[in-house]
Amino acid sequence: MTFYTIASAMPEESLAALQQEVQENLDQLKPNVILETLKGWVPGLIAFGIKLLIALVIFFIGSRIIKIIYHTLDRSFKRVDMEVSLRKFLLSVFNASLYCLLAFIIAGQIGVNSASIVALLGSASIAIGLAVQGSLANFAGGVLILLMKPFRVGDYIVSKDGEGTVRTIGLVYTVLTTMDNKQVVIPNGTLSNSALTNVTAMDKRRVDILVGIGYDSDLRRAKEIVEAIFHSHAAIMKEEPIEVFVSDLAQSSVTIGGRGWTTTGDYWAARCEIMEQIKLAFDEAGIKIPYNQLEVHVNEHRS
């Protein structure tokens, strides 16, 4: 039988007494249960509060240390004249790595299982790495270029994928501008793993001129003309050696060579002007520059 069946069979006085007794027991039970529950929580709450306080102290001290390391690295990178984009990237990587390390230390202090977090991050990193391995290769190439500095912004480089003046060096791509003002975008992975020529890496360049004259022309006079043009040109450095020599005895010409040094910025203008002056001076002196000719002989047969 249920409680309500028993209660309906009891007299009203007994029922009222029973209800009062049950209510008194409930009133006495509730505070005791809540109090005991709270008493059971107190040690855990105190322990958690202590851990949280220690974690806050670790975060405060760790943040200060990270800022000190950040500013120290920034000054060191500036001292070695590191590229701005690479400096900012490396500082961001170091800063994020140090804060991740600090987060793992704090998580371990408050009782979080950091091993599972590390495993999850490792698996995610492997999956992302496999998905973007081509871009990562270009990224690594960009870091190498910015660190090793085989060329800088403003240099003229020649590679198998194109040539031109370097306009920007990004972490993934390098942008060149050609002589006719076209834009060439080359992945950094290609540039860092292949041979290239930095035309403007040095402050000066040697101007090499080769010109052929006929075998019946005055060789000594031709050499004097070439040497005089090199010495008289304003862009040729007079403190550097100037050489004029016979380079080759070809089938139809004698090849005369001339060498002189100029600044890298004046190279192309000096080369073009010297070649033009040699041609005009040879014409005035009657020195012939041979060229290929085709002679056709026609024999007339009379019957």
Image (spheres, helix red, strand yellow):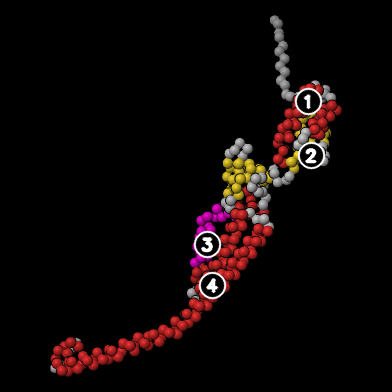
Q: Nearer the viewer, residue 16 or 246?
A: 16
Residue at numbered disc 3: 125
- For marks 3 and 4, give the CA distance: 26 Å
Residue 139 in the figure: left or right of residue 33: right
Residue at numbered disc 2: 237
The first of marks 3 and 1 along the sequence is: 3
Residue at numbered disc 4: 59
- For marks 2 and 1, give the CA distance: 21 Å
Residue 43 in the figure: left or right of residue 17: right
Residue at numbered disc 1: 281
Q: Secondary structure at mark 1?
A: helix
Residue 150: x and y, percent?
Answer: 67, 50
Q: Amino acid at mark 1?
A: Ala
What secondary structure characterizes most of the magenta part?
helix
Q: Are marks 4 and 2 in contact (CB under 8 Å)?
A: no
Q: Amino acid at mark 2?
A: Met
The first of marks 2 and 3 along the sequence is: 3
Q: Amino acid at mark 4?
A: Phe
Residue 188: x and y, percent?
Answer: 60, 50
